[in-house]
Amino acid sequence: MSVFDKKAGEIAKGKVDDVTKAVTEAWTGPQVAWTMARGGNGAFGGTRINSLRYWLPFCALFFFGLADLRRPFSLRNLDLLVLLSFSVSLWFFNKGNVFASAPLAYPPLAYLLARCVWIGVRGRPSRGAPVWPAWALIGLAVFLGGFKIGLEYRGGSNVIDVGYSGVIGAQRIASGVVPYGNFPDEDDLKACGPADANGEIRDRIQHDGRCETANPLGDTYGPVAYEAYLPGYGLFGWSGKWDTLPAVKFTSVLFDFLCLLGLALVGLRYGGPPLAAALALAWSAFPFTTYVLMSNTNDSIVPVFLIWGFVFASSAWARGIAAALSGWAKFSALVVAPLWLTYPGPVRRPRPALAFAAGFAVATVAALSILVFDAHPIQAAETFYDRTIKTQVTRESPFSLWDWAQYHARGLPDLHVVQWVLEGLLVLGAIAAAFFPSRKSPLQLAALTGALLIGFEVVLTHWFYLYVPWFFPFVAIAVIASGRQATA
């Protein structure tokens, strides 16, 4: 049963039991069009990590493992608490209260943005350090890493459509087919499977005669977001159905591990064993990295290339390749390309800049080479643009402040002008970060990278908690490094 308004369209939706005549479901506002806005602890991340008996221990291990317990009121401890404060917004989201959850995400984003800019400009690390020895922290990080894998494979996770799209794209690429415009559809196609709990039949006979579970909007990501699933697809294949998807889970575990290992190597290179242990624990214990793993999305692919690019930050080639691969996964990392181009700066000789540009170009050509699978590459490029960049820019969403004007019945303001102003500031910030400070330490590179990625998320129309790990590694480096760590 639905209620329609002449101007706003469908404004209410509900279900009535045919026997008892009782209303079993009633939705208004964004919950009409967005099932993910209706709450529920198992929709993302599975039921376990969303429960307090798992979430709170992860929070406690993250804070007490990394905090300066000798100075309880230190800025370092505040930074850690702010990182964890996204949990408050998530709690309201799980309750289906989007109009509370979305605004509560912006205070921590704003604070962390300001902190990263401050550290990036001043180049001074935070004071303090964990009270625990490095061996204890690394041991806990390894234990939590194994524990998370156990949750992943013992019924504690689910694979949402984002992860499902990865193996579809990998199958298309392995078959010599461009993913864009060729994802399994469901419109006017013959059913080949049963209806789900909502009465919807997703399994349809596709145009190639194969029975596949539909995911028509899954081809909106960059090519690397599909190419990253090729090893998992090669090992486990894909049945064509939205089943347990072992290839997706393998990829999720692989990239989570690579993020952990990369951060440990970052710490070892720039701060020795203490920083390596702290950064490894930061990734393992931070609950939002587990949230991504348990949701089996592609969101750990975005930071992993930047993390490993940071490991080899002294190489312009490596920085160029890393920025391109990350950017061609979900486009957000492209905002850091000017900063990484000029590191450590200033650009006085053309050779480093040319090496960065060459690395970026080579990685870009490799990533986009799948477009030549099509007999008409120009048309394939147009389809790629329409399905990815254009779709992402023009999409509507209630999960940020910027698109709430459509819910005019609540008297919510149109903030698109504010969003446009912030987008302009982000572009100016990306250019400014490339030149100021004129010479940057690794700590400043991490802090400004974190600031730009946060800025990108602030202006997103569709923001979600799965995006927190995009910037988290670089915020962690900026606020956890102490003394002379990462400053040389």
Image (tube, rainbow, N blue to C red):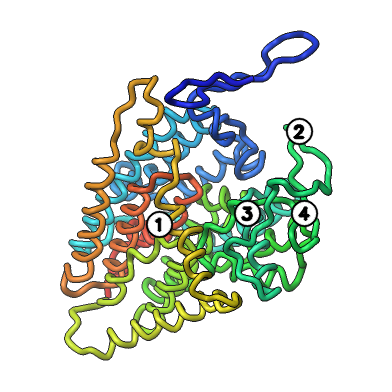
Residue at 59 percent of width and 34 percent of height: 35
* Quadrant housing the C terminus: bottom left
* Inter-mark Cα distance, 3 to 2: 25 Å
Q: Earlier in the sequence, mark 1 or mark 2?
A: 2
The amino acid at mark 3 is Asn
Q: Earlier in the sequence, mark 1 or mark 4?
A: 4
Secondary structure type for disc 1:
helix
Q: Earlier in the sequence, mark 4 or mark 3?
A: 4
* Inter-mark Cα distance, 4 to 2: 17 Å
Q: Pointer 3 and pointer 2: residues touching (CB < 8 Å)? A: no
**Left or right: 278 in relation to 40:** left
Q: Earlier in the sequence, mark 4 or mark 2?
A: 2
- Note whether residue 51 is visible: yes
Residue bearing mark 3: 296
Secondary structure type for disc 3:
loop
- Note whether residue 315 is visible: no
* Inter-mark Cα distance, 1 to 2: 39 Å
Residue at 77 percent of width and 67 percent of height: 236
The amino acid at mark 1 is Phe
* Inter-mark Cα distance, 1 to 4: 33 Å
Report which quarter residue 145 is drawn in: bottom right
**Left or right: 44 in relation to 277:** right
Residue bearing mark 4: 241
Residue at 31 percent of width and 73 percent of height: 340
Q: Where does the image place residue 159, in percent across and percent down from the top left?
A: 67, 50
- Judge by depth and name the residue closer to the eye, 315 or 260: 315
Residue bearing mark 1: 471
The amino acid at mark 4 is Lys
Q: Earlier in the sequence, mark 1 or mark 3?
A: 3
Neighbour tally class for label 1: few under 14, some 14-19, many 20 plus, Cα within 10 Å: many
Secondary structure type for disc 4:
loop
